[in-house]
Image: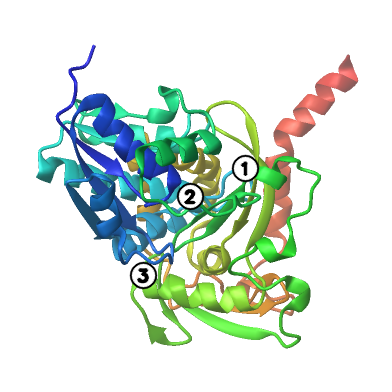
Amino acid sequence: MAASPKKIVLAYSGGLDTSVILTWLKETYGAEVVAFCADVGQGEELGGLDEKALATGASKCVIADLKEEFARDFCFPMLRANAIYEGEYLLGTSIARPVIAKAMMEVAREEGADAIAHGATGKGNDQVRFELTAMAIDPRIQVIAPWRTWSLRSRSDCIAYCKDRKIPIEVTAEKPYSMDANLFHISYEGGVLEDPWNEPRKDMFRWTTAPEDAPDEAQYVVIGYEKGDPVSVDGERLGPAALIGRLNELGAKHGVGRVDIVENRFVGMKSRGVYETPGGTILQRAHRAVESLTMDREVLRIRDSLIPEYASLVYRGFWFAPEREMLQTLIDDSQKDVTGEARVKLFKGSAEVIGRRSPNTLYDPDYATFEEDEVYDQQDATGFIRLNALRLRIRALRDQRG
């Protein structure tokens, strides 16, 4: 049995759950608790969070601005891989967890903490993502997950706990769904969304305009790429976080990036999730367009065959695992010629690529033309087809003999 921790770093948001957890940790372990909050572009007001944490019993509150690191070192590598989970989900929540947990572990090291704690439940994916990251960084760290061990079972239990202990919280009406936001996306799940037949309410969406209410005139945007990473929007060079933010604004205005799926959680059950990923949707499609000009056919085929595996690793929390790092090395090598521009048309929920160009293009109109040319001998196709058909012909001859 692990020794009782003396100092705990708690992933803290200032909401009901983490306010209860902070007090519960102090009562249960008699330990010092350092509150940790990560700014990954969730857009919530973080001012006053440190005062709230101290008033609830924390010895200190650390707020880390991770937006640039999140975009540069987590979102961009994932976008280079064109990662999509189960065909539709662009992994916005999944990719935020390792950057948060990494920063949290840095605080634990700096503070000399012997344990970390989080408010993820025992049914979700986030508990796995947080803890796999923590253990990959420090295998000796103790992880405390109160929702898996304490006697509280509901929001009402948490409110009663706060009232009994005079914990300063603002109790608001419970939302009919659970929401999580960061620079890359917003997710909605639970509540009324648990019935997969229910259409999401129109007023639920925080970012994107409903496609039917989006402007009646299309907008065109040009994304510039260098070695697989987006570097500019309409000719203006932007840093990673600013670039994603700019495309979020453009995509949201035109209703781009809504996804409604039933996905398979790592822990075993199916879950219905609704997501808004406007900038990420534009970037994923623009990236593929530049790749279509610049990547060798067989390199592209092999890389594409690895997308489901890569996406699954991100979804299941294995960002800091050797297999993800190995795949990333291969993928990044495939991107060395992916430089150019893609032109994307935004219109009523769609992001349609309508142009692409690159100084490294492998597209040669002299070979691709349907008009008369002097570089391609069409008679060569006869032998090419017969060689490729050889195994099929041999099988057919065998069957005819039988």
Looking at the picture, tell me which residue is in the foreground, 55 or 374.
55
The amino acid beneath tag 2 is: Thr
Looking at the picture, tell me which residue is in the foreground, 376 or 130.
130
What residue sits right under mark 3 in the picture?
A: 240
User: Are circles 2 and 3 on residues that touch, CB within 8 Å?
Assistant: no
| x then y, percent, for residue 216 | 76, 86
SS category of the residue bearing label 1: loop
**How many C-alpha atoms fall within 10 Å of the one at disc 2: few (<14), some, or many (≥20)?**
many
Residue located at (44% from left, 37% from top):
120
SS category of the residue bearing label 3: helix
Mark 2 or mark 1, earlier in chain: 1
The amino acid beneath tag 1 is: Glu
Left/right placement of residue 329 relative to residue 181 reads left
- Please, is residue 307 above or below residue 211 in the view? above
| x then y, percent, for residue 119 | 40, 38
What residue sits right under mark 1 in the picture?
A: 86
Mark 3 or mark 1, earlier in chain: 1
User: Are circles 3 and 1 on residues that touch, CB within 8 Å?
Assistant: no
User: Split into 4 quadrants, where in the image is the C terminus?
Assistant: top right
| x then y, percent, for residue 110 | 11, 45
The amino acid beneath tag 3 is: Pro
What residue sits right under mark 2 in the picture?
A: 93
Asked if one can make out residue 215 in the rendered structure from this viewpoint, the answer is yes
Left/right placement of residue 353 relative to residue 325 reads right
Left/right placement of residue 75 relative to residue 104 reads right
Residue located at (70% from left, 56% from top):
381
Looking at the picture, tell me which residue is in the foreground, 120 or 306.
120
- Please, is residue 148 above or below residue 296 in the view? above
Q: CA distance from mark 2 to mark 3?
A: 18 Å
Residue located at (64% from left, 37% from top):
271
